[in-house]
Image (tube, rainbow, N blue to C red):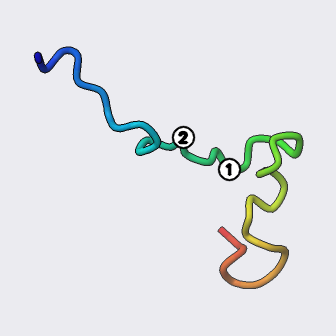
Amino acid sequence: MNLSNIKPAAGSVKTNKRLGRGVASGKGGTSTRGHKGAKSRS
């Protein structure tokens, strides 16, 4: 067992959601912020 071949447990590492990268990605457009209101604005 070396430090060079340690891997995380299966299912423990998730890919992060990339927001605002086009409508076709599924997370574009409003980028999960809804439409109006203070929290939707930058």
Of 2 and 37, nearer the camera is 2
What whole-number distance in Å separates the C-alpha atoms at marks 1 and 2?
12 Å
In x, y percent, where is residue 7?
30, 27
Badge 1 amino acid:
Leu
Left or right placement of residue 35 versus residue 33 in this view: right
Badge 2 amino acid:
Thr
In x, y percent, where is residue 17?
62, 48
In x, y percent, where is residue 24?
88, 40
Of 22 and 26, nearer the camera is 26
Residue 37 found in image quarter: bottom right
**Residue wearing tag 2:** 15
Number of numbered discs present?
2
Q: Residues within 10 Å of mark 2 (few under 14, many from 20)?
A: few
Q: Nearer the viewer, mark 1 or mark 2?
A: 2
Location of residue 40 with respect to 3 vertically, above or below: below
Residue drawn 34% across the image and 38% down it: 9
Residue drawn 73% across the image and 49% down it: 20
Residue drawn 43% across the image and 41% down it: 13
Instruction: Residue lying at the far right in this picture: please name it.
Output: 24
Q: Are marks 1 and 2 in contact (CB under 8 Å)?
A: no
**Residue wearing tag 1:** 19
Please give the label number shown on residue 41: none
Location of residue 38 with respect to 2 vertically, above or below: below
Instruction: Residue lying at the far left in this picture: please name it.
Output: 2
